Image (cartoon, grey):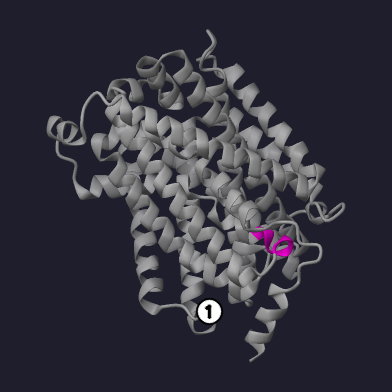
C-alpha cells in the first residue's frame, strides 16, 4: 500500500522536472554509442573477424544482465548516487566497501571520458596530414572535454536539449552509413566465415568482455533521478530502450562494415577504422559522413558521462569519501566535480593509449556491475527480483571479468600491470578516506 502511494506521488510530481523519456534515452544512448562501434570495431575484427556481430550481441546480452540489477536497485532506492549509493545502503556497516566502489566507479567513468575524447580526436583529424600525430590528437581530445565541461556547467536543461540534438542526429547518420555500407557490400558473411580460421566460443566471450565498455552508459539514467518524472516507469523504459537501440545499431553497422571494408583496412586504422574504410568504398562524402557521425556520437557520450558521473561524485564527496569541495553545488550543478572529472580525464588521455583506456574501462564496469548484481541478490525480496535472472547475472559477469583478466595476463602483461597499478592507487585512496570518516 505504501509502495503504491509512493508510486502515484512520484508519477505526478512534475513541477521542476526537466528531463523526459527522450532526454533520458538520449543520455543513456549518448553514453553507450559514443565510444561504442567507433572504438571496438577494429579491435573486434582483429581478434574474431567475421564473428564481430555475434560478439557484439554477446556483449549486449551481458550488458542486459548487468542492467537488470541496476534497474531494480534504481527503482527501489531512487538515489542519484546510483552505483555508490546502492552499495552503501545495501551494506550499511562497511564504510570501506562504500568508499571503494565509489572510487572505482568514478574512475571508470573518467576512463570512458578519456576513451570518448580520444576517439573524437582520432576522427576529427583523420582527414589531415597530421592524422597520426599523437600530440595533436591529445590536444584536440582536451579541447572537446573542455567544451562539454562548459556545457554541463551552463545548465541541466541546456545539457538535455544539446544531448537530444546530438544523439538523435547521430542515429539518423548512423542509419544512413549502415544502409550505404550494406548496399556496397563486396562480399557476404558466409564467404567471410569460410575464408577465415575457426573462432572458438571462448575467444568470442573474451572479445565480448574486452569490449563491454561499449555498453557502459545505460546507468547514467539513474543519476538523473532528481530531474525526471516517475522514476518507477522512466528508469526501466529508458534503460531497456537505449540498450536495445545500442545493440541494433552496433550489429547493423558491424555487418555493413565487415562486408564493405577489407579486414586489413579496418585493423590497420583501428582508431578511425570506419572513416578510413568508408573513404575507400564510398569516396570523400562517405568519409565525411562517417566522421560527422563519430564526432556527434563521441560528443554526446562525453556530455552524458560528465552529467551523470559528476552528480555521483558529488554524492560520494558529501558522504566524506572524496574531498568535501567536490560535493558543493551552484544552482544544483556540481561544478567542482565536473571540472575535476574533466581534468583527470585529460590527464589519462595524456598518459595512456587507446587500448589501455578501453580495457581499464571494461574491467572496471564488469567488476562494478558484478557488485551491483550481488547487492541486488542480497535484497532481492525488497526489489522483487527474479532469483534466476539475478544469479545468471552474477555468473555471467564473473566469467566476463575472469576472461578479460586472463586475456591481459596471457597476451598483454604490461597493460595488466598498468591496470593493477591504477586499481592499487584507487584502493589505497578509498581506504584512507574511509578510515578518516570512521575517525
Question: Quick one: which residue is furthest to the top in this view?
Answer: 129
- Horizontal relation, residue 262 to residue 160: left or right: left
Q: Is residue 401 visible?
A: no
Image point (55%, 26%), residue name = 292
Check disc 1 and report the residue beneath it.
383
Which residues are drawn in magenta?
A: 223-228
Q: What is the tally of numbered marks visible in this picture? A: 1
Q: Residue 308, relative to residue 110: is it above or below?
A: below
Quadrant in the picture for the N terminus: bottom right
**Secondary structure character of the magenta stretch overall:** helix
Please provide percent x and percent y for residue 153: 79, 43
Q: Residue 392, relative to residue 243: is it above or below?
A: below
Q: Residue 267, relative to residue 199: is it above or below?
A: above
- Res 303 → quadrant: top right
Please provide percent x and percent y for residue 196: 16, 31
- Horizontal relation, residue 47 to residue 298: left or right: left
Q: Is residue 239 located in the magenta-colored stretch of the structure?
A: no
**Secondary structure of residue under mark 1:** helix
Q: Is residue 79 visible?
A: yes
Q: Is residue 227 located in the magenta-colored stretch of the structure?
A: yes
Residue 93 or 192: which is nearer the viewer? Answer: 192
Question: Quick one: which residue is furthest to the bottom in this view?
Answer: 1
Residue 246 or 386: which is nearer the viewer? Answer: 246
- Res 147 → quadrant: top right
Quadrant in the picture for the C terminus: bottom right
Image point (46%, 48%), residue name = 246
Question: Quick one: which residue is furthest to the left in this view?
Answer: 194
Image point (56%, 17%), residue name = 125
Image point (66%, 52%), residue name = 308
Amino acid at each position: 500500500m505504501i509502495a503504491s502511494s509512493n508510486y502515484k506521488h512520484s508519477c505526478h510530481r512534475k513541477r521542476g522536472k526537466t528531463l523526459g523519456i527522450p532526454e533520458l534515452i538520449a543520455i543513456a544512448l549518448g553514453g553507450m554509442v559514443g565510444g561504442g562501434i567507433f572504438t571496438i570495431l577494429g579491435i573486434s575484427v582483429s581478434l574474431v573477424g567475421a564473428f564481430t556481430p555475434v560478439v557484439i550481441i554477446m556483449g549486449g546480452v551481458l550488458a542486459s544482465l548487468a542492467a537488470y540489477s541496476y534497474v531494480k536497485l534504481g527503482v527501489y532506492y531512487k538515489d542519484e548516487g546510483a552505483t555508490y549509493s546502492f552499495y552503501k545502503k545495501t551494506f550499511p556497516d562497511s564504510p570501506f566497501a562504500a568508499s571503494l566502489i565509489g572510487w572505482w566507479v568514478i574512475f571508470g567513468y573518467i576512463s570512458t571520458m578519456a576513451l570518448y575524447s580520444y576517439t573524437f580526436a582520432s576522427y576529427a583529424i583523420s582527414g589531415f596530414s597530421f592524422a597520426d600525430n599523437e600530440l595533436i590528437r591529445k590536444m584536440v581530445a582536451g579541447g572537446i572535454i573542455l567544451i562539454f565541461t562548459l556545457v554541463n556547467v551552463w545548465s541541466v536543461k541546456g545539457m538535455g536539449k544539446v544531448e537530444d540534438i546530438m544523439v538523435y542526429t547521430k542515429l539518423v547518420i548512423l542509419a544512413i552509413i549502415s544502409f550505404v555500407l550494406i548496399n556496397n557490400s563486396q562480399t557476404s558473411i558466409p564467404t567471410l566465415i569460410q575464408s577465415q580460421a575457426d573462432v572458438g566460443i571462448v575467444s568470442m566471450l573474451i572479445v565480448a568482455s574486452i569490449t563491454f565498455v561499449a555498453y557502459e552508459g545505460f546507468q547514467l539514467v539513474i543519476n538523473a533521478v532528481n530531474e525526471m518524472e516517475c522514476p518507477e516507469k522512466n528508469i526501466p523504459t529508458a534503460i531497456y530502450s537505449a540498450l536495445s537501440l545500442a545493440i541494433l545499431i552496433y550489429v547493423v553497422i558491424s555487418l555493413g562494415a565487415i562486408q564493405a571494408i577489407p579486414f586489413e583496412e579496418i585493423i590497420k586504422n583501428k582508431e578511425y577504422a570506419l572513416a578510413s574504410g568508408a573513404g575507400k568504398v564510398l569516396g570523400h562524402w562517405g568519409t565525411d559522413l562517417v566522421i560527422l557521425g563519430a564526432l556527434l556520437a563521441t560528443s554526446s557520450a562525453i556530455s552524458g558521462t560528465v552529467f551523470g558521473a559528476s552528480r555521483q561524485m558529488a554524492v560520494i564527496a558529501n558522504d566524506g569519501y572524496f574531498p568535501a569541495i567536490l560535493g558543493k553545488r551552484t544552482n544544483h550543478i556540481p561544478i567542482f566535480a565536473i571540472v575535476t572529472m574533466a581534468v583527470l580525464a585529460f590527464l589519462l588521455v595524456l598518459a595512456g593509449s587507446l587500448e589501455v583506456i578501453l580495457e581499464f574501462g571494461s574491467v572496471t564496469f564488469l567488476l562494478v556491475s558484478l557488485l551491483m548484481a550481488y547487492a541486488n541478490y542480497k535484497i532481492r525480496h525488497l526489489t522483487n527480483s527474479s532469483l534466476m535472472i539475478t544469479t545468471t547475472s552474477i555468473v555471467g559477469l564473473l566469467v566476463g571479468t575472469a576472461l578479460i583478466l586472463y586475456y591481459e595476463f596471457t597476451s598483454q602483461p604490461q597493460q595488466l600491470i598498468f591496470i593493477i597499478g591504477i586499481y592499487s592507487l584507487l584502493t589505497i585512496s578509498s581506504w584512507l578516506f574511509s578510515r578518516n570518516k570512521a575517525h
